[in-house]
Amino acid sequence: MRRKLVAANWKMNGSSAANAQWVASWRGVAPPCDAVVCAPFVYLPQVGAGLAGTSAQLGAQNLSEQAPGAYTGEVAGEMLLDIGCHWVIVGHSERRALYGETNELVARKAARAIALGLKPIVCVGETLEERDAGRTLDVVAAQLSAVLALSSVEQLAGGALAYEPVWAIGTGRTATPAQAQDVHAAIRAQLARGDAAAAQRTRILYGGSVKPGNAGELFAQPDIDGGLIGGASLVAADFAAICAAAA
């Protein structure tokens, strides 16, 4: 049976004082579940130190597809490992939409993370226009196919995938459990065509306005193995409640 995984994506939020308060609260309520906290780059050492000894591991929100070198403003996977990161988000919809990350670039970043021993959380998902046009499964399949061109299903099983319908991120709208399950099942079926056993081990997370009130119903679906949590992860008690729903 796949263990549920819940990952916090703080996005571009946080401060030294706020982070210290979050970690202190988490240490008091952390449930026994697989959890990851993906903080902004500049706060990773602080947050990593605060999470030590808890059920949560440290993650980053992005990495460069390049090895260390003359890439001003980029952060190499080697640097993430050096400060204690275990996980890294790859291909979040905001990176795709706002910063032009293509399917091919996302695939290269995922492959780079895997090569270094980082566990990628590879994100896929459709816009509202694509869903309304009935293209959800085609869009998600194309995004995943690019990743599978450079990384095997077995390699991806060491990390996680995340289905995040773009129209449900930060909007208050959430895919129904049945809608999310349909896409998760299609993702697992696509993985299974390459490696059925590894596909069954791969954790596929749902990301899109997950809150304590809806987490349990979402996580009860057979192919939803946890969540990638945005806004609700900024409050430690809310994130802990979502983790408890998974546990």
Image: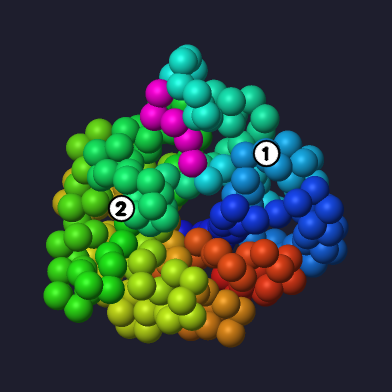
Q: State left or right for residue 188 relative to residue 202.
A: left
* Distance from the alpha carbon under mark 2 to that under mark 1: 35 Å
Reply above or below: 83 against 181.
above
Q: Specify the amino acid type for callout 1.
A: Val
Instruction: Give the SS element for disc 2.
Output: helix
Residue 66 numbered tag: none
Q: State left or right for residue 228 relative to residue 29.
A: left
The structure residue drawn at horizontal position 71% and vertical position 68%, both measured from the top left corner, is: 235
Q: Which residue is mark 2?
A: 199
Q: Nearer the viewer, residue 25 or 157?
A: 25
- Quarter containing the N terminus: bottom left
The structure residue drawn at horizontal position 50% and vertical position 65%, both measured from the top left corner, is: 227
Q: Specify the amino acid type for callout 2.
A: Ala
Reply above or below: 101 against 204.
above
The residues colored magenta run: 62-66
Between marks 2 and 1 in the image, the one whose residue lies nearer the viewer: 1
**Within-10-Å neighbours for mark 2: few <14, some 14–19, many 20+:** many
Q: Quadrant of residue 33?
A: bottom right
The structure residue drawn at horizontal position 36% and vertical position 72%, both measured from the top left corner, is: 167
Assess whether mark 1 and mark 2 are in contact (beta carbons under 8 angstroms): no
Residue 42 numbered tag: 1
Whether 40 is among the magenta residues is: no
* Residue lying furthest top: 69
Q: State left or right for residue 224 relative to residue 137.
A: right
